[in-house]
Amino acid sequence: MTESTNDIIQSTRQADNPLLWSVLHVLQHRADGFKIHTLAARLIEADLMPSFDDSPEKDLFKRNFLLMNALFQLQELLLPEQWLQVEAMDIQLLPYNPREHQIIDSDPLREYYLDWSHYEAEVGEVRRLLEDFWQRYAYFVGASKVTVSRTTALKSFGLNEWATQKEIRQAWRRLALRWHPDREGGDAEKFRNCCEAWSLLKE
């Protein structure tokens, strides 16, 4: 049975944006934070965010969309250890204070940027975009070649061969965040191994 269009769109809307790991890396190394355009410039310098459109206006829109999408995903992922302030002119990691910092699910801006249909592209284009991002990031962290089997990759995630894609994605995000080298207790080699496993299991 083939996936329905609605299923594909829903799956794509829930997709991890590989930029979020690059953004985390950049934010951890600059205490005073960024503005959205300076964050984009830093990622472009690292060759982690290429040009997306021949039209300068459309290219700017798509880069902004992808960055905001990654920021809102990362904001939720980091709780309750840290708070990621997401404002166009003030993006920075802060100590989490439950009385001051809360994610508002009904926030129109958050809803807009987490909905991939607003990227103004066909589902296939979004998937190709994410795959291109992932390949760039895997190369960046040294995990561009897969040398493990599916069984080994699943085992490294603490899963068996009957694991669902949702379970795989949840395990990936949990372990990637735990071992990210820019976080306290992180481990670059274990993070690289997680990336290698995910590159095999993410389809």
Image: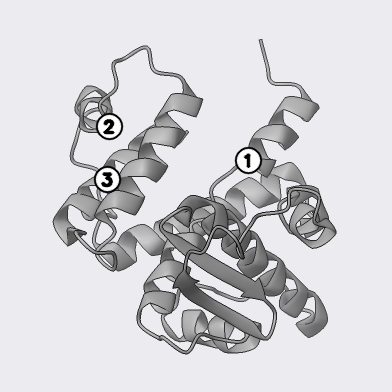
* Residue at figure coordinates x 64%, y 86% from the top left: 37
Q: Which residue is labeled 1 in the image?
A: 14
Which is nearer the N-term, disc 1 or disc 2?
1
Which is nearer the N-term, disc 2 or disc 3?
2
Q: Are marks 3 and 1 in contact (CB under 8 Å)?
A: no
Residue 70 visible in the current orientation: yes
* Residue at figure coordinates x 59%, y 60% from the top left: 99
Query: For this view, does 61 lie left or right of residue 48?
Result: right
Query: For this view, does 107 lie left or right of residue 92?
Result: right
Q: Which mark is residue 157?
A: 2
Q: Which image quarter: residue 108? A: bottom right
* Residue at figure coordinates x 48%, y 85% from the top left: 42
Q: In what element is the residue under mark 3?
A: helix
Which is nearer the N-term, disc 3 or disc 1?
1
Residue 172, percent from left and from top = 37, 40
Answer few, some or many: residues within 10 Å of disc 3's Cα (few below 14, many 20 plus, some between 14 and 19).
many
